[in-house]
């Protein structure tokens, strides 16, 4: 079918869905605390399923709890065009990270169904169960990994949460059987388009509501453990100490300085630290912290990691500390499918929405979905570039502009 006149999305519907989904796990005035397989997550998944039913989509849950709403195509054998994102959150996060993309896929498909009837190819909206790793630090992309067959048989029992529970136990507690995870694999998705808030300041600086993502950064998460000797904070002379906090302080500032020196787009963050025994008058026994390090270039990414590891070894040796680390998350960068990027750019132009083609510094389920499908993303401007905080905000107008671009792209792909 030739491209139609502008596709309009109902702002009231978008706003209602954002606010209602945010009630599941509401945290303070504007925050959301909704970790995978928690009661709040169950409520959000149920709500999304009810919305899919209400839109007249064939609704089902898969083996990891991803919620799917399908609009059948007239070409029964056609592979699906899918749009969605994750409904878990940071602890706490905001109302938009992931949630907006799950809503966007559903609103776009509902809008297309109401205006154009059945598509030629099946269209599906999806609420992915987990992306953040906020309850189980090594679970990242649990939903999209299940769809793409990237969960190994031993993973459910080996993926341990911050409270010591396995993800296998958490799945059973909400009625899901980890042994059935392979049933979630999909080989019939032609194209995946994820809408997401930008989570950074680039669109705002450019004065644009919408971005088209042509590349996504690579990431590694280290958990570093430095061990020294616990002792009295007053009686033990400085020159005789094995103080893991002194080593941690040097490493933390060193890895951050390394990313600074490499320059944009290298980034390194230490966001979590545990001190044991954690008393003001005790030289610690152990300091454990995370290092989140990202670069979109595969070679520069390895250089960044090599520099970080060399520094960690050097500081520990010089200070006579034991050091060990493991990685909980390691994801290659992605170059998005050029044809889908071009199609999204065309859809934005046809909708009269000026859009910036840009790279993503956040990681996304799209990186996993790209293993078996063509994939790219639409970004929506974030106020002050803020995200992973209850303060994150995108205006309804910007969200609608992004969803209209998404709807126009899905129309091109499926009708
Ligand atoms: C996604 O949540 C990220 O940390 O980039
Ligand atoms: Mn996200
Ligand atoms: Mn996130």
Image (tube, grey):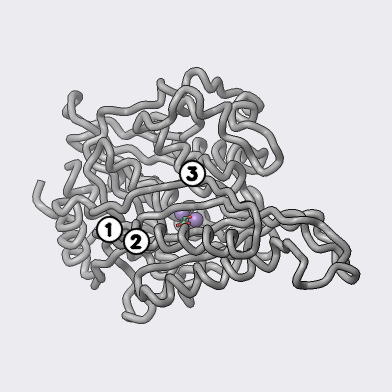
Q: Horizontal placement of 155 versus 333: left or right? A: right
Q: Quadrant of residue 26?
A: bottom right
Residue closest to the eye, 167 or 270: 270
Residue at the location (41% across, 75% down)?
201
Residue at the location (43% across, 76% down)?
260
- Residue 97, visible in the rendered structure: yes
Q: Can you give x and y, in whole percent of width and height, for residue 241 in the image? A: 76, 65
Q: Can you give x and y, in whole percent of width and height, for residue 295 in the image? A: 35, 62
Residue that numbered label 2 is attached to: 303
Report the Cα–Cα distance between label 2 and label 3. 23 Å
Q: Quadrant of residue 236?
A: bottom right
Residue farthest along the left direction in this orientation: 2
Residue that numbered label 1 is attached to: 299
Residue that numbered label 3 is attached to: 140
- Indicate which label's residue lies in the foreground, 3 or 1: 1
N-terminal of the pair, mark 2 or mark 3, is: 3
**For the residue labelled by badge 2, is the local secondary structure a helix, a strand or a loop?**
helix
């Amino acid at each position: 079918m030739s491209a139609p006149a502008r596709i309009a999305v109902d702002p009231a519907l978008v706003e209602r869905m954002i606010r209602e989904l945010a009630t599941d796990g509401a945290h303070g005035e504007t925050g959301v605390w909704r970790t995978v397989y928690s009661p709040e997550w169950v409520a959000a998944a149920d709500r999304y399923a009810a919305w899919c039913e209400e839109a007249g989509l064939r609704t089902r849950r898969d083996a990891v709890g991803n919620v799917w709403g399908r609009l059948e195509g007239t070409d029964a054998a056609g592979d699906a065009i899918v749009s969605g994102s994750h409904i878990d959150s940071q602890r706490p996060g905001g109302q938009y990270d992931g949630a907006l993309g799950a809503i966007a896929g559903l609103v776009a498909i509902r809008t297309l169904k109401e205006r154009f009837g059945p598509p030629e190819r099946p269209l599906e909206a999806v609420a992915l169960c987990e992306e953040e790793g906020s309850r189980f630090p090594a679970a990242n992309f649990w939903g999209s990994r299940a769809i793409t067959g990237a969960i190994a048989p031993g993973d459910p029992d080996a993926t341990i949460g911050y409270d010591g529970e396995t993800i296998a136990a958490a799945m059973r507690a909400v009625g899901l059987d980890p042994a059935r995870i392979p049933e979630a694999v999909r080989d019939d998705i032609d194209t995946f388009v994820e809408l997401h808030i930008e989570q950074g300041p680039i669109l705002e600086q450019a004065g644009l509501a919408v971005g088209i993502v042509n590349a996504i950064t690579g990431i590694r998460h280290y958990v570093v453990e430095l061990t020294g000797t616990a002792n009295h904070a007053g009686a033990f002379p400085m020159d005789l100490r094995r103080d893991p906090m002194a080593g941690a302080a040097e490493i933390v500032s060193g890895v951050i300085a390394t990313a600074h020196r490499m320059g944009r787009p290298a980034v390194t963050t230490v966001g979590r630290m545990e001190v044991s025994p954690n008393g003001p008058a005790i030289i610690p026994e152990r300091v454990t912290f995370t290092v989140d390090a990202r670069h979109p270039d595969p070679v520069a990414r390895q250089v960044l990691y090599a520099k970080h590891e060399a520094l960690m070894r050097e500081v520990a040796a010089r200070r006579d500390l034991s050091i060990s680390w493991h990685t909980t998350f390691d994801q290659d960068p992605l170059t998005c499918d050029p044809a889908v990027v071009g199609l999204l750019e065309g859809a934005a132009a046809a909708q009269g929405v000026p859009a910036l083609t840009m790279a993503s510094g956040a990681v996304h389920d799209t990186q996993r979905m790209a293993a078996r499908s063509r994939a790219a993303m639409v970004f929506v401007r974030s106020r002050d570039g803020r995200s992973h905080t209850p303060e994150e905000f995108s205006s309804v107008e910007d969200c609608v502009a992004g969803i209209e671009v998404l709807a126009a792209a899905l129309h091109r792909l499926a009708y």
